[in-house]
């Protein structure tokens, strides 16, 4: 019989969903239970059902897991930022390792060796980029999951202390001068978001206020407030965003004070970062990810390397140290601009950056007679398009190193590349986002047939 809303059932949790929810089965039907841990026995109440799955909440904990802990956050649950604050870090790592293994087997149908996950020593205050939603009150915080309702958060455990203090500075300025927040429903109001980026190498921060106007009232007082709360500030920027879309960092950018960019260091290289530049959220773990990428690439100094989806050129510059020639490709113009400046700033000569879509780049290189020996791909969450997979396979590099932020799309693409003659030798999970359900992976593929 199908499950019925508001029914009570006693279940034992048998595993986790990709978002870290507990999973149980009642008469063969899958039930997702928020904040339930594997091997727990609990009484649950059915909240919502479909023909195949149901969602429930814990009503009574009968037998808790030894890995259950009390979340050290007052808004955990309503806030959509974190997923795993209710479990120990040991259990989080086990869950993420299993998630990768399951995706490769179930989605990709592949028997692949999964190396031990690369854990972090810092599970709080690690994010070097924060985007706070701003609402009237004034409040700063984060959206409730699957909504645009702001959950006020005066401090966040995974953002840097600098970012939290910058949010305080903005709220105080808005309150003192009666500055309105933007309302998505009425499309009125001034302040939309606050963006803060922290350089892990120096502790300096760049603060970007996203607003609907090209100027701010009492802007000198805002600058004073930011400096008072965040003396480590090196850049204050205004982003004028009049769009009705959900893209935060778009429109015109104007420097209100200081530099127009932030500089950070990764594996001994300096990177110039404008507000829209892509840069890894967790630099210490990013270094471990890139070291693993370097190991898988196995460069001797004689190879040509192609880095697709190169962003500001982080991986391209790192690979250039060990390659004969490195090529980065990216479709976002500001990122390519920063990448070229990063190459110049680091005095790296054996490198070039191409502004183009990934599939177009591979065609261009073939036309130029360039045949990369190693290709590195770091696509967005949706993974590689079939066209890119075809183009990459036609180039026939010796090795492909695939960096992924979604195990399911990684597994799908590894299967497609397997059909093109590339065998996956190993996958290494990397915990880039502690206390969140996301898990990064880097995979090594080798050409076994032409």
Image (cartoon, rainbow, N blue to C red):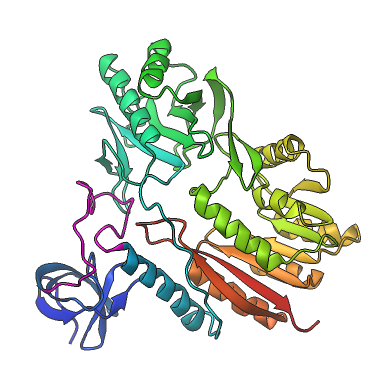
Location of residue 16 in the rendering, given as x and y in whole percent from the top left corner: 32, 73
- What residue range appears in magenta? 63-88
Q: Which of the two residues, 175 or 159, is positioned nearer the viewer here?
A: 159
Q: Count the marks.
A: 0
- Asked whether 119 falls inside the magenta stretch, the response is no
In the image, taking residue 417 as reference, residue 231 lies left or right, namely left
In the image, taking residue 73 as reference, residue 113 lies left or right, namely right
In this rendering, does residue 163 appear at all? Answer: yes
Asked if residue 155 is positioned above or below residue 258 in the image, the reply reads below
Asked if residue 155 is positioned above or below residue 100 in the image, the reply reads above
Location of residue 86 in the rendering, given as x and y in whole percent from the top left corner: 24, 60
Q: Residue at x 63, y 79 (%)?
A: 425
Asked if residue 162 is positioned above or below residue 34 in the image, the reply reads above
Location of residue 436 in the rendering, given as x and y in whole percent from the top left corner: 37, 57
Quarter of the image that includes the N terminus: bottom left
- Location of residue 121 by image quarter: bottom left
- Location of residue 148 by image quarter: top left
Q: Which of the two residues, 376 or 264, is positioned nearer the viewer here?
A: 264
Q: Residue at x 31, y 58 (%)?
A: 83
- Location of residue 334 by image quarter: top right
Q: Residue at x 26, y 39 (%)?
A: 153
Quarter of the image that includes the C terminus: bottom right
């Amino acid at each position: 019989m199908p499950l019925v809303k508001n029914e009570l059932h006693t279940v034992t949790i048998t595993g986790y969903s990709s978002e870290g929810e507990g999973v149980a089965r009642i008469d063969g039907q899958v039930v997702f239970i928020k904040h339930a841990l594997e091997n727990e026995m609990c009484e649950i109440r059915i909240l919502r059902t479909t023909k195949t799955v149901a969602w429930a909440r814990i009503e009574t904990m009968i037998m808790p897991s030894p890995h259950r802990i009390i979340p050290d956050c007052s808004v955990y649950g309503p806030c959509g930022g974190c997923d795993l604050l209710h479990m120990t870090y040991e259990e989080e790592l086990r869950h993420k390792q299993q998630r990768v293994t399951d995706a490769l087997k179930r989605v990709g149908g592949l028997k692949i060796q999964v190396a031990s996950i690369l854990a972090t020593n810092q599970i709080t205050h690690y994010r070097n980029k924060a985007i706070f939603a701003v609402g009237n009150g004034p409040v700063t915080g984060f959206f409730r999951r699957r909504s645009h309702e702001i959950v006020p958060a005066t401090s966040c455990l995974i953002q840097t202390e600098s970012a939290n203090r910058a949010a305080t500075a903005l709220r105080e300025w808005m309150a003192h001068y009666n500055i309105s927040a933007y309302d998505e429903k009425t499309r009125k109001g001034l302040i939309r978001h606050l963006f803060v980026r922290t350089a892990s190498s120096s502790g300096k921060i760049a603060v970007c206020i996203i607003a609907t106007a090209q100027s701010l009232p009492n802007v000198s007082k805002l600058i004073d407030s930011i400096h008072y709360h965040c003396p480590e500030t090196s850049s204050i920027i205004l982003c004028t965003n009049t769009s009705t879309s959900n893209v935060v960092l778009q429109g015109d950018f104007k420097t209100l004070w200081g530099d127009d960019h932030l500089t950070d260091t990764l594996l001994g290289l300096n990177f110039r970062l404008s507000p829209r530049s892509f840069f890894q959220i967790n630099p210490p773990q990013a270094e471990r990810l890139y070291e693993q990428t370097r190991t898988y690439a196995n460069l001797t100094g004689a190879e040509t390397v192609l880095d697709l989806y190169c962003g500001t050129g982080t991986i391209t510059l790192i690979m250039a140290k060990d390659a004969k020639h490195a090529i980065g490709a990216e479709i976002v113009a500001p990122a390519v601009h920063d990448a070229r400046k990063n190459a110049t700033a680091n005095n790296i000569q054996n490198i070039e950056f191409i502004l183009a879509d990934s599939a177009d780049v591979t065609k261009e290189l073939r036309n130029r007679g360039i045949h990369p020996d190693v290709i590195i791909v770091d696509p967005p969450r949706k993974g590689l398009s079939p066209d890119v997979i075809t183009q990459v396979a036609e180039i026939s590099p010796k090795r492909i190193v695939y960096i992924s932020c979604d195990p399911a799309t990684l597994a799908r693409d590894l299967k497609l590349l397997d059909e093109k003659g590339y065998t996956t030798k190993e996958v290494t999970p990397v915990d880039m986002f502690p206390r969140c359900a996301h898990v990064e992976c880097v995979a090594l593929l080798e050409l076994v047939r032409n």
